[in-house]
Image (cartoon, grey):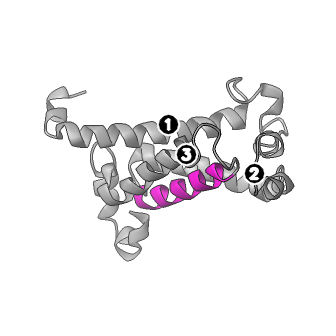
Amino acid sequence: MDFERLKEFGPEKLAWVGLRLGLGWITLWAFIDKMFGLGYATASENSWLNGGSPTTGYLSYATDGPLAGFFQDIAGNTAVDVLFMLALLMIGVALILGIGVRIAGYSGALLMVMLWSTRLPPENNPILDDHIIYMIVFLAMTVVKPGRWLGLGKWWSETDLVKKLPILE
């Protein structure tokens, strides 16, 4: 790694790159653990590959508040499982590579609001919890565009596809 090259980015850009990579890894790791059951949040026998549902446990037993019934009703639904896992995978990969950061930011913010709404009010604060903070960071990434630094975002933004559909930046 050329550490001299890092100096050209400055601490602000490096902080945003760190946030991008950190959130990317959090979401990609959630996908990996739920897919393969590596024993962190998901036991091997409950992995998606072993026939487990990535949404059943949480949505069935950890939801609380006015929307709990709705979330409990959709727990284990195949379409919900597929959409949830695709969201984790696509958001994580996009952020780590630095491509599609805008749509990953909007998607990640939506995912965080949905997760926040599963336990209302939040346990330790009447309004805010970590999901809202993550949502704010996801939305900030859509404006700051940190995929252009130490990522493939600059190249990606210059492709014909992204020029035609800027939401994909």
Q: Is 28 located above or below residue 80 in the figure? A: above
- Classify mark 2: residues with Cα within 10 Å, few (<14), some (14-19) or many (20+): few
Could you tell me how far apart the alpha carbons at marks 3 and 2 are, in whole angstroms? Answer: 16 Å
Badge 1 element = helix
Q: Viewed as shown, does residue 122 lie left or right of 56?
A: left
Residue 56 % position (x, y): 82, 44
Q: Amino acid at mark 1?
A: Trp
Q: Which mark is residue 65?
A: 2
Q: Nearer the viewer, residue 112 or 92?
A: 112
Q: Disc 3, disc 2: CB below 8 Å?
A: no
Q: Is 30 located above or below residue 90 in the figure? A: above
Front label number (2 vs 1): 2
Residue at image mark 3 = 131
Mark before the other along the chain sequence, 3 or 1: 1
Residue 88 % position (x, y): 60, 47
Q: Is 122 located above or below residue 4 in the figure? A: below
**Which secondary structure type mostly characterizes the magenta part of the structure?**
helix
Residue at image mark 1 = 25
Q: Amino acid at mark 3?
A: His
Q: Viewed as shown, does residue 68 lie left or right of 32?
A: right
Q: Quadrant of the C terminus?
A: bottom left
Q: Nearer the viewer, residue 156 or 117?
A: 117
Q: Which residues are magenta?
A: 101-117
Residue beneath the point at 53% across and 41% down: 130
Residue beneath the point at 71% across and 37% down: 35
